[in-house]
Image (cartoon, rainbow, N blue to C red):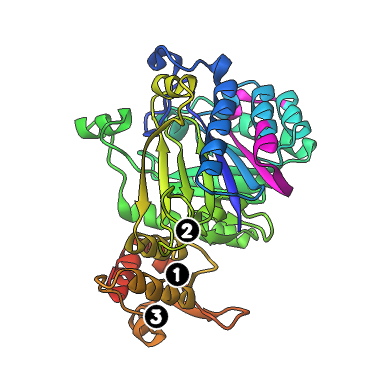
Amino acid sequence: MSFEIYVHVPFCLRRCGYCDFNTYTAVDLGAGASRGNYANMVIREMRLVRDWQLAHGVEEPPASTVFFGGGTPTILPARDLVAMLDAVRATWGLEPGAEVTTEANPDTVDADYIRELADGGFTRVSFGMQSAMPHVLRTLDRTHTPANVEAGVRAADAAGLRSSVDLIYGAPGESLDDWRTSVRAAIDLGVNHISAYALTVEPTTKMGRRIAAGTLPKPDDDDEALKYEIVDDMLADAGLEWYEVSNWARTGYESRHNLGYWRNVDWAGLGPGAHSHVNAGAIADAGPDDGPRPALRAWDIAHPRLWGAAINEDRIPWGGSETITPGENLEELIMLGLRIREGLDLARLNEEIASARESDGSLPLRPIDVAQLRPMVDEGLITVVRDAANHSRIVPTRRGRLLNDAVIERFFELAGV
């Protein structure tokens, strides 16, 4: 059993043109939770969440990972990030050897900042690199330079922290050679973990409006697929293997926090808009005679001002919550398992199908046999491998990763979800 903590820091120096995350600049934040008091507000939320857990019979183990995301966590002073980490340690405890990561904008950190993080217990920094090409960075409204990224990675190396860099492909005006240059630059940094995400443009963003107006070209699916194949080949040649559709690492350097999400562990999300997930024991009126306890998903109020008002009233700042039905749980098990290299455990899936049918006989669920998967194997979408427990695990091929949504839908049809 694992338990993770996610801390959302919603502040940014400026909003990137493609960004659709729950983030706020000084201009659009308005009155609400200020940066100067933000760490204290998050620490207060920790206590409220812990009180809720205890009141509902949820006894989590010490946190195995802590991840600060955003927004730009490193817009806050390093001492604030360390103070929040110390509060996690005091509230839930930290597992020995816990992974503690912060995302970082290369413009907001220097060697002293990173050393303070390392001294405070952080183990990992994930740098937002996006591209090595200045014209692509301008299109994405990024203010950092490739030199800033390298300086950040070198500072992390000197402080004994692991580094990861994030790349984005498919930006308007990015050629195949531009993309190869960016991937090569990331490899040459010597990091042991690289993420690469296809650009997704939401219509409400600045970039979305420019594309709608015809001043920027729309990202092309075929172009993005080719760029995915390029990054997969280049990283494999450099010794980094894919372990999730958008993530590559040397063995032992995978992001344990992200793997926890894909393995469907429990996590507490703190900060405006953060989501939480509890697998069982989440419903106050569910007792041992009521059958299986449902899982629960909850999400914090999105706007910092309203989020902060709830905390000031000693209310857990959830904007809403929902129980996860047996059918939804199966959908998540399939979707998550088919994104990772360790694959979907077919025996576990069939156990969950049987349990869901037992709890709700109206569900039209069906177990899946390996023989039913032969068409997808023949189409080059999946492979079936045996693990140490002699379980069949379904692993997407590269073609299956590129067509991941279609593969997931076919599994839904086979299982009847």
1 and 2 marks in contact (CB < 8 Å): yes
Q: Which residues are magenta?
A: 87-110
CB atoms at circles 3 and 1 under 8 Å apart?
no
Dot 2 or dot 3: first in sequence order is: 2
Q: Which residue is mark 1?
A: 396
Per the model, the C-alpha gap separating discs 3 and 1 is 9 Å
Report how far apart the C-alphas of labels 1 and 2 lie in the structure: 9 Å
Whichever of labels 3 and 1 marks the residue nearer the N terminus, that label is: 3
User: Mark 2 touching mark 3, by CB under 8 A?
Assistant: no
Q: Is residue 103 highlighted in magenta?
A: yes
Say which residue label 3 marks: 377
Q: Is residue 317 left or right of residue 81?
A: left
Whether residue 131 is visible here, answered yes or no, is no
Please name whichever residue, 294 or 218, is drawn nearer the observer in this view of the structure.
294
Q: In the rendered image of this protein, does residue 196 appear above or below residue 173?
A: below
Identify residue for label 2: 245
Instruction: Pick whichever, 349 or 35, lies toward us.
Output: 349
Q: Which amino acid, by three-letter code, is at mark 2?
A: Val
